[in-house]
Amino acid sequence: MIWKQQMKKASVVRFMDKIAFTLGMLECCCTPWVISQYPEWIPFVHTFQSSILIVVRYFLYKRKSWHFFLLDMCYFVNVVVIMYLYVFPQSQALLGAVWLLSHGPLAFAIVTWRNSLVLHSLDKVTSVYIHMSPPITLYVVRWLYPDPNYTRFSALKDMPVLPTSSSLTYAIALYLTWQVAYYVFVVVRQKEKIKAGKRVTSYTWLLNDPKAGVISKVAHTFGEKYSIITFMGMQLIYTFVTCLFALLSYKYFRLNTVFLVGLFLVSVWNGASYYMEVFSKQYEKQLNKLAEEVSSAVAANQRAHDSAGAGAGETTGNGDRHSSVEAEPQKSASAKKDD
């Protein structure tokens, strides 16, 4: 279609990337302002933006058969955080669990999986957002929310620190609930589709990705057959260890602040590395490829047009010759009549 060809033009791609970059920068500027001036808006902002980004990602990933990625733990934690914000704000057990999971494995994933703040890339911005926004939202609820009587989030009342044992228990219980469900409904029931390459999961991606390095090697310690089980065990240990740090972040405001700022800087640094080392080369290749595709499409259309024109001309020529042949008998008949 014409509009698809237009969208592939290098000039259009550049323009769309500029818009995406501008919106991303606007987000980075506006979020701190909202936090400082209207912290009570943050839960709604998080819910609205994360919902849009996840829905858009679903449709984009669905076309590539990547939609099983949306069953990963990070999306599960995002859903549970929203449940706490709107359904169970009075539950201290759920507060402890979502705080540990969001400030633990979810937040540390920015470092572990090198999430990059690449402002023109919707995919990379979404990855940073779903890992960064839940802990920031809970940070605002914990430290900055203008509700001294705790009428909105009553679970915070009389809980200056998280109870270690119960919070860890509920957090790990939530994690295991997700892990068991994921193993049954994805790893087992979708095994044939995954094996045939019809579906891609984070497990198959990470375990077969050379960039995963040490993680992939350790997961294959007991062989290919047990690599997924081994990886699940590694992830459980990772979740538990990172949750231990999250206990401290709930207790100390400065530590929590420095931690979140540090995570943001890591994502920015990863984004800068991507721009300098990867994107500059890939972008030029991508634009050249798009230009070649558009040129090929235009050339094909031109050839088709020329062929159609030539065919029409040939038909007209045949018609003229046919008319001339018909005219000859008429001319002969007239000559005989004159004789």
Image (cartoon, rainbow, N blue to C red):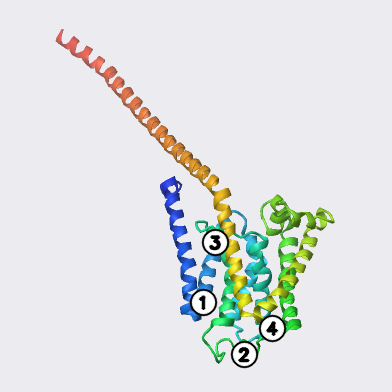
Does residue 193 appear in this view? no
| Circle 3/circle 1 CB separation < 8 Å | no
Label 1 sits on what residue type? Answer: Ile
- The answer to which of marks 4 and 1 sits earlier in the sequence is 1
- Badge 3 element: helix
- The answer to which of marks 4 and 2 sits earlier in the sequence is 2
- The answer to which of marks 3 and 2 sits earlier in the sequence is 3
Label 4 sits on what residue type? Answer: Leu
Question: Height in image: 10 above or below 43?
Answer: above
Location of residue 124 by image quarter = bottom right
Residue at x-position 45% and y-position 39%:
297
- Categorize mark 2 by other alpha carbons within 10 Å: few (<14), some (14-19), many (20+): few
Label 4 to label 1, Cα distance in Å? Answer: 22 Å
Does residue 84 appear in this view? yes
Q: Residue furthest right?
A: 222
Q: Mark 3 = which residue? A: 125
- Categorize mark 3 by other alpha carbons within 10 Å: few (<14), some (14-19), many (20+): many
Q: Mark 2 = which residue? A: 157
- The answer to which of marks 1 and 2 sits earlier in the sequence is 1
Label 3 to label 2, Cα distance in Å? Answer: 34 Å
